[in-house]
Image (cartoon, coloured by chain):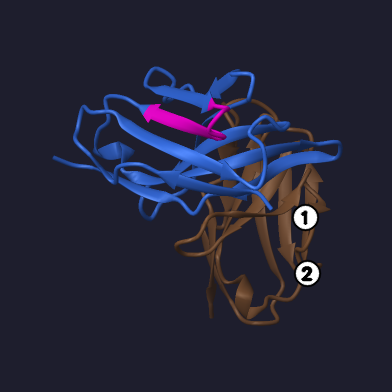
Chain colours: A brown, B blue
């Protein structure tokens, strides 16, 4: 299985802050990675696919980058609606594997 | 707009079989998507269980493969999950979802609301 190591597991930030979340893949997965946002009691929602493509309807403050083994999700200016848990997901090979999640909390 | 809705028992006895159905509305299960199951134990992360194409082709997580069966019912426009020999470790919210393969990338595009299944006597 491809191992996805996501960091940090949690972070505290203020509205307006820039936030960066990282996923490392072992072995490499080209650009076969998506980022998902999950709010309590809700299903995940795709924000980014193919490592850097913004899903339709997702605010432009979200961006993704990386390829191979290291990937980053960046929120350029954190908004109140962004407090949630974020997961990366690799789809390079089966089984699909998620990162452990990053909980973004209010500082 | 595709909508997915899980249904099934919320309580299953240990060593029993967990059975869930996902009804698809607003779209055809015979479309070019893979119909998937993902679970999330309380307070924990997401785990991919497996998927099925309308042709009946399946892919399963090896960690669950010996216990999992995913099937499709085209006339009813739904698909199903069966997980046998369950233990307390299988207690989770179970989501059904559709996986879209696009020319520029692929992703989970639609999700059900999730259903909590508790394994307990």
Pointer 2 local density, CA inside 10 Å: few below 14, some 14–19, many at least 20:
few
Element assignment for label 1: loop
Q: Is B23 a magenta residue?
A: no
**Which residue is rendered at x = 81% and y = 67% of the image?**
A60
Q: Is residue B61 visible?
A: no
Q: How many marks?
A: 2
Q: Position of residue B70 (x, y in %)?
A: 48, 25
* Residue at the image position 35 percent from the left and 52 percent from the top: B42
Q: Which numbered tag is attached to residue A61?
A: 2
Determine the residue positioned at 56% across, 26% down: A1
The spot of residue B24 in percent (x, y) is 57, 42
Q: Is residue B22 above or below residue B17?
A: below
Quadrant including the C terminus of chain A: bottom right
Q: Position of residue B20 (x, y in %)?
A: 39, 37
> Magenta includes B79?
yes
Write down the chain letter for disc 1: A
Residue named by callout 1 = A55
Dominant SS in magenta: strand
Same chain assignment for discs 2 and 1 = yes
As drawn, is B83 to the left or to the right of A2? left
Question: Distance between the Cα atoms at labels 2 and 1?
Answer: 12 Å
Magenta stretch: give its range: B73-82
Most extreme residue toward the front is B75
Question: Toward which corner of the image does residue B57 lie, by quadrant?
Answer: top right
Q: Are marks 2 and 1 in contact (CB under 8 Å)?
A: no
Q: Secondary structure at mark 2?
A: loop
Above or below: residue A16 compared with residue B8: below
Q: Give me the disc on residue B42.
A: none
Determine whether, in the image, residue A10 is placed left or right of residue B63: right
**Foreground of the two, B4 or B12:** B4
Depth check: A47 or B74 in front? B74
């Amino acid at each position: 299985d491809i191992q996805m190591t996501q960091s940090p597991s949690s972070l505290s930030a203020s509205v307006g802050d820039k936030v960066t979340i990282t996923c490392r893949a072992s072995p490499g997965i080209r650009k076969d990675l998506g980022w998902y946002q999950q709010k309590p009691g809700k299903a995940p929602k795709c924000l980014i696919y193919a490592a850097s493509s913004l899903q339709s309807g997702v605010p432009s403050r979200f961006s993704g980058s990386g390829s191979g083994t290291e990937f980053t999700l960046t929120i350029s200016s954190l908004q109140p609606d962004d407090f949630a848990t974020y997961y990366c997901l690799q789809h390079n090979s089966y089984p699909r594997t998620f990162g452990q999640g990053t909980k973004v909390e209010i500082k | 707009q595709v909508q997915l809705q899980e249904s099934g028992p919320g309580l299953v006895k240990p060593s029993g079989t967990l059975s869930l159905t996902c009804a698809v509305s607003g779209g055809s299960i015979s479309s070019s998507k893979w119909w998937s199951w993902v679970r999330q134990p309380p307070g924990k992360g997401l785990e991919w269980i497996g998927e099925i194409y309308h042709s009946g082709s399946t892919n399963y997580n090896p960690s669950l493969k010996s216990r999992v069966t995913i099937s499709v019912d085209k006339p009813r426009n739904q698909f199903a999950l069966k997980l046998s020999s369950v233990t307390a470790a299988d207690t989770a919210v179970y989501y059904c979802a559709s996986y879209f393969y696009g020319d520029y990338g692929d992703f989970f595009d639609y999700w059900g609301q999730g259903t909590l299944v508790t394994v307990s006597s």
